[in-house]
Amino acid sequence: MGSRRTVLVLGGGPDAEREVSLESSRCVAEALAQGGRFDVRREVISAITRDELRALAGDVIFPVLHGGFGEGGPLQDLLVADARPFVGCGPVAARTAMDKLATKLAAARVGVPTAPAAVFHSVDHVSPLGLPAVLKPVHEGSSVGVHICRDGDAWEAGVQSVRADVAAHPSRVYMVERAILGGRELTVGVLDGRALPVIEIVPKAAFYDYHAKYHSDDTKYVVSPEIPAGVGEQIQAWALALAREIGVRHLCRVDYILDPQGAAWLLEVNTMPGFTSHSLLPMAAAAAGIDFPRLTEKLVDLALAPARG
């Protein structure tokens, strides 16, 4: 009888989404343990070093971290150097997907429409793209630091907040994007090169912010929603094309907004989406017949599989 593999589940990290990562990693570890195929070890980390990672026991690593360090390349660099199999994409794809402007360039190469955007310069007093506009960090997820500016007063308040944030975090870069108001938020999960069912997010509040994503029970999720003919298939095809272009492996979630005219626009790509009770990729997988324990096992199996040519 062969020896059982040990999965090292990592959670935490130094980023703004640490709390979500702690919950996601707990859920993943519990699901893997429930499945019974693997031994499971969960570790809470911060900005771990290469030597600290190497000292953590496990045959395969499932890094359930969200944000710049854990999802945006630095941890992936350490995982590659560690040389153990791990779930999720490599460092180049991680950096590209975490960078919203780089993601827009990748989208343009494969014909996926995105709203016009530019780097925001905090010395500017007016939006270079007019109003309404959205101010958001280039390298954050989970709607952290997002300001929807419908008018001049909201723009000024957003700019003041961004200036204070940049003063406290000088390396942080913001972008300004043309706002698409009155739209419907849609998401497509990708699992092993397959597009999962479309989900619509219907928050009670006007904006699907961090609280609505992870804490609010008022947010509704509609699997395979009623949307214009062909839109679901189109955004699924776009999700697959964009994942291939960026170099994503194993999983990702691609978010869109459907404008009042029925046109879909890319918002962002998440290479390690949430795995909490409110999370969308597990919900989409369940709609496709893959329950949470099977989903986590499948991802470990993908990490352990020989590299595909």
Image: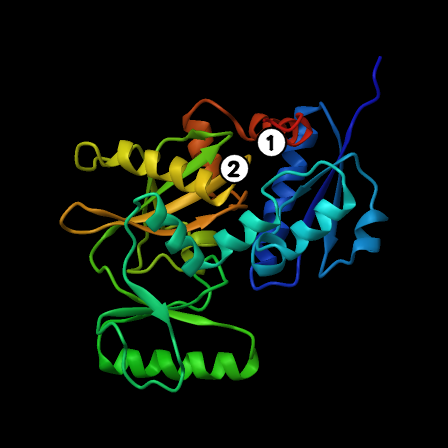
Amino acid found under the numbered disc labelled 2: Leu
Tag 1–tag 2 contact (CB < 8 Å): yes
Task: Report the coloring of the rendering.
Answer: rainbow
Res 309 quadrant in image:
top right
Res 209 quadrant in image:
bottom left
At horizontal 51% and vertical 41% (from top left) the residue drawn is: 247
Q: Crowding at label 2, few (<14), some or many (≥20) Cα neighbours within 10 Å? A: many
Q: Position of residue 81 (x, y in %)?
A: 75, 48
Above or below: residue 190 compared with residue 102: above
Going from the N terminus, do you reach mark 1 or mark 2 first?
2
Front in this rendered view, residue 175 or 189: 175
Above or below: residue 126 compared with residue 18: below
Above or below: residue 196 compared with residue 260: above
Residue 84 horizontal side relative to residue 197, left or right: right
Q: Crowding at label 1, few (<14), some or many (≥20) Cα neighbours within 10 Å? A: some
Q: Position of residue 98 (x, y in %)?
A: 50, 56
Residue 280 appearing in the image: no
Q: Position of residue 44 (x, y in %)?
A: 73, 53
Location of mark 2 (residue): 251
Location of mark 1 (residue): 299
The dot on residue 193 is none
Residue 65 appearing in the image: yes
Res 84 quadrant in image:
top right
At horizontal 44% and vertical 49% (from top left) the residue drawn is: 269
Residue 199 horizontal side relative to residue 30, left or right: left
Front in this rendered view, residue 23 or 77: 77
Amino acid found under the numbered disc labelled 1: Leu
Residue 205 horizontal side relative to residue 71, left or right: left
Disc 1 to disc 2, how far (Cα)? Answer: 8 Å
* Dot 2: element: strand
At horizontal 21% and vertical 35% (from top left) the residue drawn is: 226
* Dot 1: element: helix
